[in-house]
């Protein structure tokens, strides 16, 4: 008898650093949501890490500055249940949340 495992869909929150190599004050961090089909959460995490690392790069912006794009970590990963809500997170300070989500 052959047991066939069915793949599940996982959603991961990935953190990326966009660093201006000439001016650290212009460094930004980005959250990306990535979907991955896999047999287990461990396999999904490995595949997402590999994919995020392949996206690492550097480029020249319009001002001639070198920008480095670097995968930092998977902040969170969960099985997607097929509903409308893809992801949720909780926080205990609206002021910190507002500052975090401001590019000013």
Image: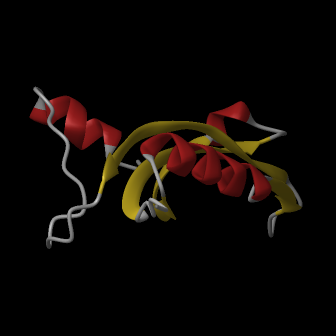
**How far from the left and from the top, in percent, is residue 37?**
48, 65
How many numbered discs, if any?
0
Residue 15, can we see it? Answer: no
**How far from the left and from the top, in percent, is residue 78?**
32, 47
Q: Is residue 48 above or below residue 86?
A: above
Instruction: Write down the quadrant of residue 19 in the picture.
Output: top right
Which residue lies at the image location 22% right of the left edge and 30% below the top edge? 96
Q: Is residue 55 above or below residue 22?
A: below
- Going by the image, does 104 lie left or right of 93? right
Which residue lies at the image location 82% right of the left edge and 55% below the top edge? 57
- Going by the image, does 2 lie left or right of 69? left
Which residue lies at the image location 24% right of the left edge and 55% below the top edge? 87
**How far from the left and from the top, in percent, is residue 73?**
57, 35
Q: How is the image coloured?
A: secondary structure
Which residue lies at the image location 86% right of the left edge and 61% below the top edge? 59
- Going by the image, does 42 lie left or right of 60? left
**Of the pair 101 and 77, the residue shown nearer to us:** 77
**How far from the left and from the top, in percent, is residue 23?**
76, 37
**Of the pair 46 and 39, the residue shown nearer to us:** 39
**Of the pair 90 and 6, the residue shown nearer to us:** 6
Instruction: Write down the quadrant of residue 95 in the picture.
Output: top left
Instruction: Write down the quadrant of residue 7 in the picture.
Output: bottom left
Residue 82, can we see it? Answer: yes
For the view shown, which residue lies furthest in the top direction? 92
Q: Is residue 72 above or below residue 45?
A: above
**Of the pair 71 and 68, the residue shown nearer to us:** 71
């Amino acid at each position: 008898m052959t047991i066939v495992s069915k793949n599940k869909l996982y959603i991961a929150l990935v953190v990326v650093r966009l660093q201006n190599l000439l001016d650290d004050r212009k460094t930004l961090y980005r959250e990306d949501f990535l979907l991955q089909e896999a047999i287990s959460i461990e396999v999904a995490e490995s595949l997402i890490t590999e994919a995020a690392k392949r996206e690492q790069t550097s480029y020249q912006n319009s001002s001639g500055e070198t920008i480095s794009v670097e995968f930092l970590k998977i902040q969170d990963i969960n099985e997607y249940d097929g509903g409308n809500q893809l992801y949720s997170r909780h926080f205990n300070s609206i002021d910190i949340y507002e500052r975090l989500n401001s590019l000013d």
